[in-house]
Image: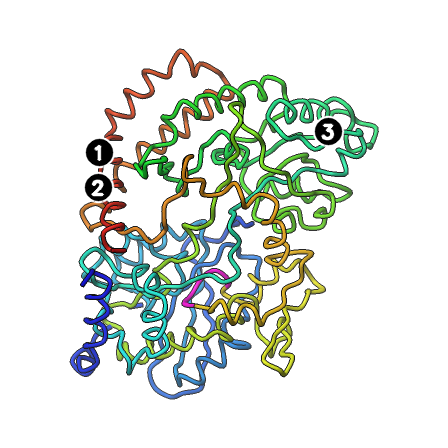
Amino acid sequence: MNKLKRTAALLMAAGLSLSMLAGCGTPGQDSTSASPGAEQNTTVGAAEGYTYKIATVRWNDTWPTDFLTDGVMGDLAKEADIDIEWQIYYSNDFGEQKALLFASDDLPDAFFGSCGLGDSDIVQNKEKLLELTDLINEETMPNLMKIFEEDPTMRMACTDRNELIYSLPKKIPFRPKLNSQNYINKEWLDNLNLEMPTNYDELKEVLIAFKEQDADGDGDPNNEIPISGYKPGYGSVLLDSFDLIERGDEHMSLDANNKVVFVPTQDHYKEAVKYLRELWELGVMDEEYFTQEGSMYTAKLQKEGGSQIGIFSGWTADSWAGPNTKQFVQMPTLESPWGTKNAQSIASTEYSDKELILNINCPNPEKVLRWADLFYDDLVSLQTFYGSISTGQIKDNGDGTYELLTPKDNTLDTSAWWYSPRDFGPKYMRKEFEEKVTLPTDQGDGLKLVEDELNAQYADNPNLLHAWPGTIKFTDDEINERTALNVDINSYVEAQWAHWITEGGVEEEWDDYLQQLDAMGLQRLIEIDQGAYDAYVEMMG
């Protein structure tokens, strides 16, 4: 019996433990400013008795939060007979705020959504958080238990290396095969009679033309920005075809033999740096590429009268370019200098955990979990991802099929964040149910799925660098050690990245750079990650 099956048996046998634990129980786009320590409180539910304080973290303080009390979210609270006071924080300053929360012991009863606490937060505060393993059972969470049986990856997503569960999982629906992609200003290409670039030499010529030939046609040849990004300026999808596929911001990947490699030490990485240094010297990269915040970047993309930018990377064009979306089209994957094509898979982000975490002092935690279990329903998950039927974001066709409606006030990508928890919170939608839902194909996730057809064939090539699964788990000690290692290593890598592109010197400084990374503990970091990957393979059996 492998570890997944043993975990299943433990969960199935846990039904009688509820009464023993009834007294346990606290709690494309970029964040904008919010006052440190400030939060909004919104209360929902009509049941008498205890009011649960549930914290959630949002990307953007300009988006409405009415969805927490309206539509399906309000309905779920009423169905579970639970009173909720939502404590709303914002991602740009939540790191400081959560440190204050844990230091003061004034925690909410629960944290909702994986934008709140990370693995290191859980490990460092386990004495304040409720272990959920025995509480997840047929009586308290029948929907989730059924999903665990149907899809063992969901169980793996939330089960740690000790086979314990401290948070609830999710699976995001309507996933394409590819992550963010490149978009090019087709209007500028047409104005200059240019062809779509297919390799890095052609791309360079296009960028030079964008800079020198008044690509936007306004009479000023000096106000175009051929290519832009925002700090730290690392991770452009332009790098995929340099065979630089990574796992998030930690710069790890798997090679053709499924061995962990640290991407910023690869020879191809050095070649990418040299190429981008050349672009910098040519003046085709945004001078603020390494210093501007996301809000400055999007202001250039969405400039009234037409975008200032020629090429950018993002989830979809509409999620970043907004009113200027129609200027942009998807770019084909570029051929590398050595003739290969590679693209960043999204496989590592479909499943995740930390979607609901309970304070160990949360009164009657079973009640919160029964409420959370309601989220693990196909139709509920559809509404907590896009918006509610009752508030007009989704149409019920009356025959078991549903249609996502195009909003009049913004794009579909933005609308989903306005009217639902979107990526955050417990959810699970079965593939057969997804087939009953119609998405518009001209924007948002529907467009993303259409666009996937162009480059998906280049993702997860086992003979090239490829992403590893997002459900890999580390032990508590490993989490603490790799968190400490990553702080210094990643800061150094990103500083050198910007230095080499803007000032040069990668060839002369490369050997010293590799030695410095080893001195910082890089080989130990690789060893930890390889061990975790091997444990994952063993658990999958």
Residue underneath mark 1: 524
The amino acid type found where label 1 is placed reads: Arg
> As rendered, which of 511 and 151 lies closer to the eye?
151
The amino acid type found where label 3 is placed reads: Asn
Residue 517 place in picture, x, y as percent: 29, 25
Q: Residue furthest top?
A: 508
Q: Secondary structure at mark 1?
A: helix
Which quarter of the rendering shows the N terminus?
bottom left
Residue 219 place in picture, x, y as percent: 83, 28
Q: Secondary structure at mark 2?
A: helix
Residue underneath mark 3: 223
Q: Is residue 517 left or right of residue 419?
A: left
| Residue found 54% across the figure and 46% down from its top | 456
Residue 417 location, quadrant: bottom right
Q: Earlier in the sequence, mark 3 or mark 1?
A: 3
> As rendered, which of 82 and 327 lies closer to the eye?
327
Q: Point out which mark residue 75 bears.
A: none
Q: Earlier in the sequence, mark 2 or mark 3?
A: 3
Q: Is residue 490 left or right of residue 208?
A: left
Residue 428 place in picture, x, y as percent: 43, 68
| Residue found 63% across the figure and 64% down from its top | 439
Q: Secondary structure at mark 3?
A: loop
Q: CA distance from mark 2 to mark 1?
A: 9 Å
User: Considering only vertical position in the picture, is 225 above or below 201?
Assistant: below
Q: Are marks 2 and 3 in contact (CB under 8 Å)?
A: no
**Numbered range of the magenta stretch:** 422-427
Q: Point out which mark residue 481 bears.
A: 2
Which quarter of the rendering shows the C terminus?
bottom left
The amino acid type found where label 2 is placed reads: Glu
